[in-house]
Image (cartoon, coloured by chain):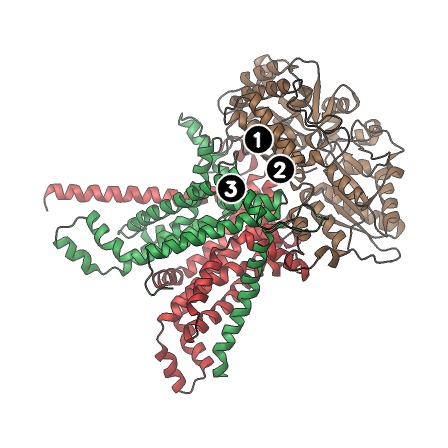
Amino acid sequence: MKPIDKRAGLLTRRQTIQGIGGVGLGLSVSGLAAPAVHAQSKRPIRFLNGETGKDTLAFFAMAAKLYEEKTGTEVIIDSVPLGEAFTKLTNGIRSGTPYDIGTTGFIGQVLLLAEEGHIVPVNEITDQYEWGNNILFPIDEKVYWYPFDYNLALIYYRKDLYEKAGLSVPTTWDQFATNCEATVEGRQKGCLFPIGSNGATNWMSFGFMWAEGVELFDNQWNVILDSPELAPKAAAYLDFMARLYPTMPTGSLQASYGDVLSNVVAGTVAHGAYAGRVIESAERDNPEIAAQLDVMPYMDSTGSRTAANHGYDGWMVMNTDNSSAAMEFMNWMTSELIVDFLHTAPVHFQPTRLDIYDNDRWRDNALIKKHSGMIETMRGLITDESVVVTSIDTQGPNPDVRPGKVFESFALPEMLQNKILRGMDSDEAVSAAAEKIRQAVG
Amino acid sequence: MTRWLLPGFLTVGAIATLVLIVGPALYAVSLSFYDIPSLTSDPVWVGLNKYAVVLSSGEFWNAMWNGIVYAGLTIILQVVLGIGFALILNQKFVGRSLLRGLTFLPYLLPTVIAVLTFKWMVDGSFGIITILMHEWGLPAVNWFETEAASMFSVILISVWLWTPFVTTTFLAGLQTVPVQLYEAARVDGAGPIRQFFHITLPMLRPILTVIVLLRGVWMFNKLDVIWLTTGGGPLGATEHLPVLSYRKAFALFDIGSGAAIATLSFLVLMIAVTLYFRAFPMEEVK
Amino acid sequence: MNQTLMQKLFFNRVALYLAVIVLAVYSAFPIYWMISSSLRPTQEILTNPTLLPRSLTFQYYYSLLAQTDYPRQFLNSLIVALTTVVLTMILSIMIAYGVTRTRIRGKQMIIAGMLYAYMFPPLLLAIPLFAMFNLVGLNDTLLSLVISHLTITMPLGVWFLWGFFKTMPFELEEAAMVDGCTRLGAFFRVVLPLSIPGLVTVAIFAFLLSWTDYTFALVMIGSDANKTVPLGLASMVGAFDLRWGDIMAGSTLIALPLFAAFTMLSRYFVQGLTAGAVKG
């Protein structure tokens, strides 16, 4: 998945402008461009793909060809970076040329489309499998997407540096910070966690806070970040991050997904967050480092709990006159070819279906074999109930668009900046963030 | 044919202006009187409400101030450096025409490239500047990590990009100053500094007036350097009116406020330009 | 010449060359670094870059041209910029010439209006323009981008050319017309050739504005197929994988044609710039 998609948010700018198209001119754009339904027999299935890796693109070309040979139904694949997929999807709906299958990396988008009836439940292709924790997000038992990877943000670290400095894998914040401090050497820094107002920070830097048991909302959607129980924990998290900061390279404020990835792959930091792409990238550009990387979850201050930050991506079947054909195709692809799909980014596409972890064909892959220990760790995170698997946009008692707004408001990255750049008191930074969240969710 | 040529030209021009500029501009301003809360609901007329909210918000005044600082400092630096460079390039030395070409190159680069190259050069791990400073035993520079440093960095990039415009224009202007004036001044015993302030500057004042005007308007409206470099951060330290307006309209989906901010910024600019014309009337009034 | 004068002259020379070197490094180093980074292998970029590359590679250029949308984006940018130039020229010549050669009231207002149009925040125009394009089905097309660029280039073009036409004596055209030319003929045979420096300047300005535009493209263009280079380049960075080599190669490929064009046209450009700035 491209974590970038998180920046695009629930509503895209293009949509918003379209929504306002009528003002002033007295015309309603949405009315003018109402979806026109063309009744056609066996028209091609239009698939909007959001995974633009070279191998993944080749996979879809192959799958489309195979399916046409087998059934005579043509499948047209359009590929855009995931960050633009939602815009393209909704533009299609508005202009009367909807896609039949779409890709998303944001549960809020699934909810929005489900509420407006643009997507159909996919239970018939998901019910038969057992899934990892916290991934299907059903609404009234109905599952609206087929998630294909977890894309968990985890902490990657260098085994060789640990060995050299005689360090052990940390289980508490204090140990982690000590390890970061111990691995600073010349241009090589201890760790890199982004702190800027961007999607990368939202995805990579709050795992520690989730592990500590901090939550944003209670069951009634009240903001509880600054409650008497949680405020001290959030404040402690800020103190911890402020302690890590001096061990980071300069520029963590600007750090994007790519910056963190390059730093881990190049070996200029001893610890850095990311998903499996780190391995694929390192194997390609810097194999010596790849052999030295291992992974650990985010930990809490006392060593009693661990966490991983959600990334997830999935496919949705759109509500069109071609839905049943699309569903058939999805059923075929997800049962026959899912392993081939996952192999296009073997470590990065962490399976969501539990049966895949025991699938021999899936296991029979050079990278998966080579990093089997890491894969086991990753599998453990999604089956062990004690591991917190969450993210800003999936906070709250049930799937909802509100956490998506918190994501967009960058309230939490600003909390980090208030603490680290402005030297604001931790408690004060937490209350400011809670206030900002309240504003964001209205 | 002949009789209709000029009116024809003017009609085409008028239509183009109406369609391209006046229409959209009025429409844009009208947006600021509406609240458009979401995709599905209809716009609601709210009158001047958006303006009231915007004007009473701290972020607007912060952005206004940042905009003044950004535009002001970039213009001053562009003009000062531009004149300095032009004076150097006006001397005789080996490789002069080559250097004249080189100094113009930054102006040709898209902002995106300048921003990316700058970020690449100062990258905390791989940037050549970071590495050289490390090798020379100097402390790492936090190019973006403090509020002042971020402002400094965006100004630096902007100045680098657009100084060549001033340099080239001023240099071309220098050729038009009659040599006799300098000779006469030298006979009177005036040194180079006095010559500069008493001959060069007054002679080139018309050029300078136009440069400052065009650059000033440009810098005040310029979105992309800041948007691509810092996005207005950290914590609003480099957020000026265009960024604020963009963020409101396109990131927070409050088109009304975005339009209100942009309209206000246009008014501010209009007042500033009108005052500027008063202070520096241009020859052959426009 | 006495010795102190010699010393002073020598000192001045040294100071001048020092300033020249500083100026050269300041202007050219970032560009050098951009180009040289685009020619280094990834390992060298990431491990220990030195001022001079130790080995050269064209792999980024190869992968850019062969595996990404870069060629397409380049073509899009070129189409948009050239169309913008042509339309800007036609419109601004017509308006500027019309305004200078007629005695209508409110002439000043038109010119002042052009300046105010230049002052109008581009972003503010982008919103309604986008809505308009949506209405007429032009959304996410290259044409929509061209029209958006015209909102900046046209006022600027009128402003510059007005300065040019204004200083051109009426008598020239009248003489031509007496010789049997129509007004249009006089315009083409006399006025335009004499305004070449100004026309070139406007063309270059329009080209640069359009070629380097990011703001409008960000709003107007959605699909990959219609992206221009600055937009494509920016989304390359935004993506999950930071490929500095590819980015710098892409940047170099955008910059080089501009450098080449500038070298060929610089004489006109400088002339026009001065004339435009001096006159208005």
Question: On what subunit does the disc labeled 2 rest?
Answer: C
Give the label, 2 or 1, closer to the camera: 1
Q: Amino acid at mark 3?
A: Phe
C2 left or right of B109 in image = left
| Residue A58 x %, y % | 74, 44
Q: Are marks 2 and 1 in contact (CB under 8 Å)?
A: no
Q: Amino acid at mark 2?
A: Asp
Which one is in front, A214 or C260?
A: A214
Q: Residues within 10 Å of mark 3 (few under 14, many from 20)?
A: many
Q: Are marks 1 and 3 on the same chain?
A: no
Q: Secondary structure at mark 3?
A: helix
Q: Are marks 2 and 1 on the same chain?
A: no
Q: Which mark is residue B60?
A: 3
Chain C, hue in figure: red
Q: Amino acid at mark 1?
A: Glu
The answer to whether B148 is drawn above or below residue B199 in the figure is above
B51 left or right of A350 in image = left
Quadrant (top left, top right, bottom left, bottom right) of the N terminus of chain A: top right
| Residue B122 x %, y % | 47, 35
Chain that is green in the image: B
| Residue A87 x %, y % | 70, 47
| Residue A313 x %, y % | 74, 37
Find disc 1 in the rendering and name its residue. A414
